[in-house]
Every structure is written in C-alpha cells, then in structure tokens.
Image (tube, grey):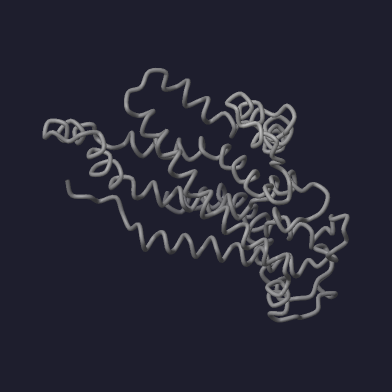
Amino acid sequence: MKTKNKSMIILFLAPSVLLYLMVFLYPTARTVVMSFFKVEGVTDSVSLWKFNGLGNFKTLFNTPLFVSSLKNIALIWLIGGIGVMVVSLLFGVILTSGVHGKSFFRSVIYLPNVISAVAMGTMWINYVYNPDFGLLSSVLKSIGLSKLAATQWTSPEMVFWSMLVAYCFGMVGYHMLIWMSGIERIPVDYYEAATIEGANVFQRFSKITLPLLKGVCRTNIVLWTVSTMAFFVWSQLFSPVNLSASTVTPMSYMYELVFGASNSAVTVRDSGAGAAIGVILTIVVVVVFMLSQLIVKNDDVEL
C-alpha cells in the first residue's frame, strides 16, 4: 500500500516538477551562467558565448547610467518604503479599530492595485500632474498657491519625485492589507486588558500592536524589496522616449541592454550585461531577506 502511495505521489508531482525545472530553474541557471559571458542576443547559441569573467559586472559599475539607476532604486526603496509602510500601517490600524464602512474604505484604498500600472501612470501624468488642468494644479490654485500650481511636475528636475509619489500611491493598499491581516490576528483580550489597566490608544499601539507585528513587518519589507527591484513600467511611462538619469532603474536599463529599445542608441545589445543586472538584483533581494531575518526574528512578545 505504501509503495502504491509513493507511486501516485510521484505521478502527480512529476508534471509540476518538470514545469518548475523548465520554466524557473533552467532559465535562472542559464541567466547566472550568462552573466559571466559576452553575449549579444539572449537567444544566441551557447557556442557563440565568449567568456568574460567578471567583466560584465565591472563594465556595469563603470557605466554612469547604471550607477544612476542604482541610486534611483535605492531612493525608491528607502524613501518610498518608509512612506508606504507608515501610511499603510496607519490605514491598517484605523480600519481594524472598529470604524464603520471598513469594507468600503478597504476596497477604495486597494483599488489602485486592481488597475494596471500603465493606466495608473497615464492618469497621473495627464490628469494629476498636468499644469493646465491637472488635479494637483487645480487644488493648488483653489487655495491661492498659483505660483506652485504652475510647476512642471514632470520636468527633469521634478520627474523622479513625481514618479515616486505616483508609484507609492498605488502600493499603499497592497501593504495595508498585509498589516491588517497581522493586526486582526492579535487577540482582542490583550487590548481589553490594557484598556482596563488604563492604557490609552497610543500606549496600546506601541506596547501591543507594534511588537506583535514583527513578522508582518518582515514580510512587508521583503515584498516591498521584490516589487522595488522589479520597478520598470513607471520608469518607462515617465521617460517614454529615451533612458533618463532621473528615472532610469536597473530593470529599465536591463531591458535597454537586452533589447536595445532606446531611440538614443546610447547602448548596444548586451545580454550578458543584462543577465549580470538580474544577478545583482537577486543578490540585493537575498541580502535584504537575510538581514530582515536577523533583525526581526520572531513575534514572541511577553506581555
């Protein structure tokens, strides 16, 4: 009977394992190996690859545009991450505090995640940041800030921050739901006991809610890192013609190298360097994950 069960398990697992090997493991291994070779086209035969050692990585870190992309992604991760985490946590706490219309507000805040990034980016560029009839301009004019309302929010000096605000706006709802899932698992008895002891709202938040959200915080940090490293669409929307030092990210630069899509022809096709970028981003995600595991160890708090 045991042998028969093992055979059935192998039979049912085999398709999934084969798909995993073909769709995920093989491309991953090929990308890592490719990063050490000079490769022009991503579909080039292995016989055309020329060993380059760490040459691709050295070339990338000596390229000003790639260095700019690393600076941009670091700012998006740090400043955008702090903003998103604080705002999403605030919404999560409010919506789990017994407020009326919880389902409605949760749906409204999460709505930007349902809309495609292309549609969201287009909306922000054309209907929010437009200096003539955009929402931001209209609001500023209505409160008497006409000079500020005339600001070109998508100009080279402002485009990065405009892009960051638009991106963070769409990410708040996603991380809010994760915070809410953690808050709703905290036993109500803890809050009731604290209230009886005379603890106010802020004390309950700092002494109960925050300490018991360590695991959720770790999850949010890792998920934010993964989504940030994959930052691509927004960069393309805010700089649709050529790569710009203000909005370029490693993913958009990798796309440039692999497909040679820029009209400026600043770069040539170099799939080996593109693969090296993928390896660098993977290492960043792994390092952040390991650090989060070390810094935020568990949820066990003695109350």
Residue 65, by quadrant, is: bottom right
Query: Which is nearer the eye, 29 or 248?
Result: 248
Residue 180 lies, with reference to residue 228, above or below; the image says above
| Residue farthest top in this picture | 100
Q: Residue at x 48, y 40 (%)?
A: 175
Give left or right: position of 296 versus 266: left
Say which of 81 and 257 sits in front: 81
Q: Give the vertical position of 229 relative to 102 (above or below).
A: below
Q: Residue at x 74, y 59 (%)?
A: 253
| Near-viewer residue (228 or 127) | 127
In this rendering, the count of numbered labels is 0
* Side of 23 where 172 appears, left or right: left
Furthest-left residue in this view: 197
In depth, the one of 34 and 216 nearer the eye is 216
Q: Which percent across, then down, holds residue 64?
A: 72, 69
Say left or right for 25 vs 241: left
- The x, y position of residue 77, in whole percent, is 54, 54
Picture quadrant where residue 140 is located: top right
Residue depicted at 49% across the width and 45% down the height: 83
User: What x and y, as percent, mark residue 268?
Assistant: 85, 66
Place of residue 239 in the rendered image (x, y in percent of width and height, measured from the top left): 76, 48
Report the side of 45 relative to 195 (left or right).
right
